């Protein structure tokens, strides 16, 4: 299945792009996607903490993915 992954802020800087398509097995879950990102883009591991949204809803690492899903990797933000 094909998944679109969107990156923001530091995540975008570490990956070098703001969006990419990833291929996963049909039984893939969010954790599988994260593992594939860490393998393909080792700097991604530096992100440390982040939230994950699938189709605009927050998701857990155990949530199943399906073909055409859009996953956003949301790094911590600060402001003041």
Image (cartoon, grey):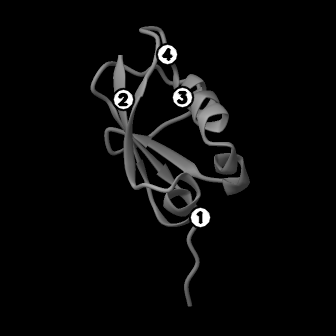
- 2 and 3 marks in contact (CB < 8 Å): yes
Q: Residue furthest bottom?
A: 80
For this view, does 42 lie left or right of residue 72?
right
The image shows residue 60 at horizontal and vertical percentages of: 55, 34
Whole-angstrom CA distance, mark 3 to mark 1, is 19 Å
Q: Earlier in the sequence, mark 4 or mark 3?
A: 4
Q: Which residue corresponds to the image point at 54% horizontal and 57% vertical from the top-left? A: 11
Q: Secondary structure at mark 2?
A: strand
Q: Mark 1 highlights which residue?
A: 76
- 4 and 3 marks in contact (CB < 8 Å): yes
Q: Mark 2 highlights which residue?
A: 3
Q: Mark 4 highlights which residue?
A: 28
The image shows residue 57 at horizontal and vertical percentages of: 37, 42
Q: Nearer the viewer, residue 63 or 73?
A: 73
Quadrant of residue 3 within the rendered picture: top left
Whole-angstrom CA distance, mark 2 to mark 1, is 23 Å
Q: Mark 3 highlights which residue?
A: 33
């Amino acid at each position: 299945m094909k998944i679109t992954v969107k990156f923001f802020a530091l995540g975008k800087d570490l990956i070098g792009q703001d969006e990419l398509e990833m291929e996963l097995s049909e039984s893939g879950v969010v954790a599988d996607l994260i593992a594939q990102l860490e393998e393909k883009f080792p700097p991604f591991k530096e992100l440390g903490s982040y939230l994950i949204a699938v189709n605009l809803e927050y998701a857990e690492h155990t949530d199943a993915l399906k073909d055409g899903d859009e996953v956003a990797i949301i790094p911590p933000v600060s402001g003041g």
